[in-house]
Image (cartoon, helix red, strand yellow):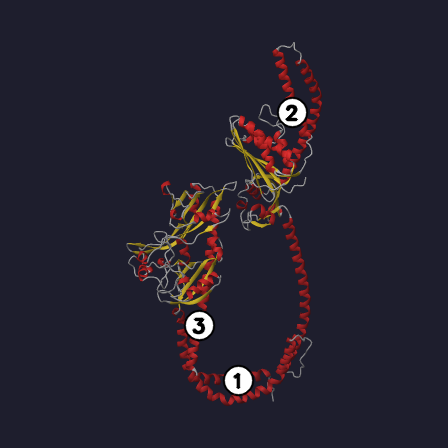
Amino acid sequence: MPRITLFKKILIITLLLTLLPLLASSLILLLNLDSINTRLTSEIADTADIQASESLQMRAQHVAETIANFLRQCENDLLFLSRTPLDQQNLLNFYEIRRSEIWERHATHTGPREVRRQVPLYRSFAFIDSRGKERIVIRDGRFLTPSELRDVSTPSGTEFKSEDYFNRIKQLRRGEIYVSHLTGFHVSKQEQLAGASEPEYAFDGASYQGVLRFGSPLFSPDGSFIGMVVISLDHRHLMEFTQHIDPGKNFSTVFPSYQSGNYAFLFDDEGWIITHPKYWDLRGVDDNGRQVPPYSAKSSQADIEAGRIPFNLDHAGFIHPNYPVVAAKVRARRTGYVDITNVGGAKKIMAFAPISYDTGDYRRHGVFGGVTIGFQVDQFHDAARKGSRMINRELREHRTLSALIILLTALLSALSAWLLSRGISRPLRQLTDGARRLAAGDTHERVPVTSSNEIGNLASSFNFMADELERRKQSLLSTLDELRHSRLEILDERNFKTSVLESISSAIVTFSPEGLLTSINGTGRAFLGSETSVDMHFRYVFRSWGNLGDRIDRVLSTHSGYGREPFTIDRGSGMTYFDVGLFPIGSDAEMGLTVTMRNETEKEKLREEMLRLDRLASLGKLSAGIAHEVRNPLTGISLLLDDLHDHAALAADDQAMINKALAEIERVERLINALLNYSSPPRSDFRMGNLNMVANDTVLLMRRQCERQKVNIQLNAGELPSFKFDPEKIKQALLNITRNALEAMPGGGEIRLSTTSDAERVTITISDNGPGIREEDLPLIFEPFFTRKGAGTGLGLSITQRVVEEHHGLIRVESTAGAGTSFILELPIAVNP
């Protein structure tokens, strides 16, 4: 008798066993057809709801991210404009360039027509001076005339009669940005509909003319506030993000249907709706600039009928409790969806997502507001209804077929179960136990092979698999160890290179062959600004670095000119010296260009200071030698002239001439004494004292000379701490500066001495209202022997500078031609003599 293989056994028994589940399922279906139909229909509907809700949620998140990026772009536009010369041509060019598409409806004599056109992003640009006066304004494509310019320093003078952006921006620091909430005059229901029954049919009605204002303060090079730049985002471009969303089959539309419930809208972080098919739902102010109250349970019937009911989700709980919930979740930066009913009574699912944004007032919650997309619930259930009809038809056919099959399968099922259990259960149990031990990690366990049929072959294959698993396990463990070691080496090498680049005091910046930035270290960001990022073009990166961008362009285009060159630039606080190197990456810069920048300013200043000190030291030695050599013969000449002067036989003219000679000799002696004091100054005597006393003594010593010359001298003494200094030398320095000021005002004037202090230093300022110092003389005034006075030695300010430096202090001068001069002396309180 031929042996029946296991394959045949399983095939025959499986055919029999497939009838048993069919019997059971048929009996169950016959008893529970109605409940199954209802449950399946409900599950299909629930699944459709969930899928549609998640799809709407993803779309809302995408729109929210797009709006966040758009707002950041508006900030970039503002910062770019604030760094651009604010003349009419620049403003007009920027206004015309920054455009975006508007898709809207226009009424014509043949009916409504859809129009797509490019419209400026901003309704207006304005430059406002420090007093709140508009100086240059371009609005709706034209510059306002002087008679149209406003004083916006008070809210009543603004366009919408209630805006306080001037005072808000005035309080900001350099580089900070103010962003307003949506502002505009409220549009009532009658104004929008203009006789139409619904918003989608209102082609001739009024539109909402609102703006979002972005502003940044402007400062002069000395840090004083000089005004601000304000750009006003046209509200229509915000409407473009939600107005054309159709969650239904069309996906997009020129204007959504409010009654259908299939539309999207935006609300801000305060809960106010800022884009919506119904313009009367948008936040706004009345003609007097007052905020129109939100629609609430307390709104009057007259306001409701007139459409003076802007919508705020925080106050809309009486319409549906989920509206305030959505506003709260968005402020908590959460996404999701809720069931909701709108004012029109449409039941729908509403998905929402927060718009991440933290500039200005929006920093409070970290969101600009939220995006919501709604879709009517009934339209989700078409698939469920179709499925229910199909199930009913199939179940009717199944009843008939099941009744016939049940009778034929009953006897065969019992016999098939016995045969299958006896022929396959025991060997399969052995394989199951072996597989369980193998899964538990015992790769040494093997299954005994007791037959030569398919079960025996299966056992042999199982044992072979166990052997192979053991071998591969060991190989895998070895490979994992090698990978772990390689990963650690790669991480160490990468961290080492990163640490080296970040620790270098030079800026290292690399560009691709196309001129796009590929990497930059920390020093490079310190030189070029923290906003510098990868993929910026080198022209933009070095936009404020003179001709450096042209040099890089020349090197990239000609593949020559590599190497280091000195580079000097005025960055607002004096000349800055750099050593700039350009080096190719790869052969002929085929992989890009490396730019290195090292700040040589301190080194250059040190070199200049060393030259100055060498020059002063040489000058001091020369002056001391000359003074000693000249003083001895000069003393003899003076004695001879005194003796000659005492002879009575001399004529009066001769005696007058001898007196004049003696006076000139005295002046030479004073010059010699000054040279000796300059070349060999006495050692400073530091002791505790109050600088106000020295300043007061200086005023008392100079008061009589000032009164004779009709110069008013006064002291404004502040509260000063006692600290160590040399009173005599400080008094000498103050007298030198005060005498210079007095000599500069032969026709009278005013000299003011003032003292102030902080935690680290004491400051004394000597100011006059004389003719000032010529600009070309300012770098030379502290040089020895420099003077514009015929009788001066030119050593007064040099000695004064040295006295201040002996106190480890700082002296600087501010002078304006025709307006006077101020010398500022800063002395540290904690000085080490």
Q: Position of residue 700 (x, y in %)?
A: 58, 31
Q: Position of residue 283 (x, y in %)?
A: 38, 56
From the viewer's perspective, is 183 left or right of 703?
Answer: left
State the CA–CA distance, disc 2 to disc 3: 105 Å
Q: Position of residue 550 (x, y in %)?
A: 55, 41
Q: Which mark is residue 671?
A: 2
State the CA–CA distance, disc 2 to disc 1: 128 Å
Visible residue check, residue 62: yes
Rendering quarter of residue 821: top right
Q: Residues within 10 Å of mark 1 (few under 14, many from 20)?
A: many
User: SS of the residue at dot 1?
Assistant: helix
The C terminus sits in image quarter? top right
From the viewer's perspective, is 262 left or right of 439?
Answer: left
Instruction: Write the residue at 66% across / 30% down.
Output: 678
For disc 1, the marked residue is 17
Q: Nearer the viewer, mark 2 or mark 3?
A: 2
User: SS of the residue at dot 3?
Assistant: helix
Is 381 located above or below residue 131 in the figure? below
For disc 3, the marked residue is 46
Q: Position of residue 815 (x, y in %)?
A: 54, 33
Instruction: Write the residue at 56% across / 28% down.
Output: 704
Q: Nearer the viewer, mark 1 or mark 3?
A: 3
State the CA–CA distance, disc 1 to disc 3: 35 Å
Label total for image: 3
Is 346 located above or below residue 15 in the figure? above
Front-most of 688 and 24?
A: 688
Q: Amino acid at mark 3?
A: Asp
Front-most of 97 and 143?
A: 143
Q: Nearer the viewer, mark 2 or mark 1?
A: 2
Visible residue check, residue 619: no
